[in-house]
Image (cartoon, grey):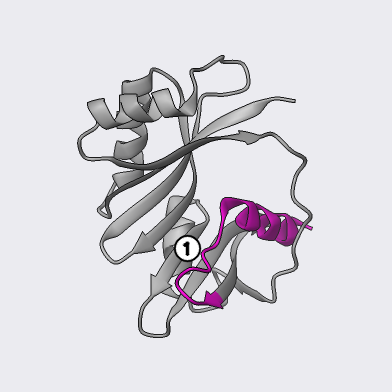
Amino acid sequence: MTATNKIRVATADKTGAITLVCAEVSSAIGMSVQAEFQEIEGDCLILELRLGDEKTRSPHPTRLAIAVDNAAPAVQVLSAWQEADSAEPFPKHCHNVLGVQFDTMPPVAHRALIDSLPTAQWDRFDGSWHLAVPSVFATRPLVGLSHRRGYTHRFTSFEAAAIRGGLAS
């Protein structure tokens, strides 16, 4: 069984932040970097990044995190870990699906579509996390939405993948 190195980083939420962070992290570690999930909390953007690929042997994630800390001052490393490559998550049915051409999109859904990335956003006014998962059905973009109450009940990239699988089926 193979494992994938991942890192969770924070940066200022500004235009082009995902591209800039991926470029800085890639430059720091000398490997490919792919954003898999983003969380928005106020003006802070938190990204879950996949480091390298299955063909590349890489150092332990802690060493990669140290390299990022030293070389990318605009990026704050929050955590680093190895995740076992497992089977795709069981598709999860999503009750709230919006079609781009037919429905009014909340800001988190619009952001997920623009960035083409599952996006969670904290709403301090209603005390809940909102998750938007972009997908395509018959060449039409759509977004699955979910929410949960409580700050500590965050969404994960695995849950986003399960919703994406449900949207595709």
Q: Residue at x 69, y 76 (%)?
A: 95
Q: Residue at x 48, y 18 (%)?
A: 59
**Picture coordinates of residue 127, whole percent (x, y):** 43, 81
* Foreground residue among 5 and 131: 5
**Picture coordinates of residue 46, whole percent (x, y):** 38, 52
Q: Is residue 141 visible?
A: yes
Q: For the N terminus, which image quadrant?
A: top right
Query: Counting other residues with Cα less than 10 Å from the Cα at mark 1, is it few (<14), some (14-19), or many (20 or more)?
Result: many
Q: Is residue 138 visible?
A: no
| Identity, as a three-letter code, of the amino acid under mark 1 | Ala
Q: Is residue 71 above or below residue 44?
A: above
- Taking the magenta stretch, the answer to whether it contains residue 2 is no
* Foreground residue among 51 and 81: 81
Q: Residue at x 39, y 17 (%)?
A: 30
Q: For the C terminus, which image quadrant?
A: bottom right
- Residue 79 placement: quadrant: top left
Q: Is residue 92 above or below residue 79?
A: below
Q: Residue at x 51, y 17 (%)?
A: 58
Image side of residue 67 versus residue 56, left or right: left
Q: Is residue 51 above or below residue 123?
A: above
**Picture coordinates of residue 21, whole percent (x, y):** 32, 38
**Picture coordinates of residue 24, whole percent (x, y):** 30, 30
Image side of residue 29 versus residue 112, left or right: left
- Residue 53 placement: quadrant: top right
Residue indicated by mark 1 = 120
Give the farthest residue toward the bottom: 126
Q: Which residues are magenta?
A: 148-169
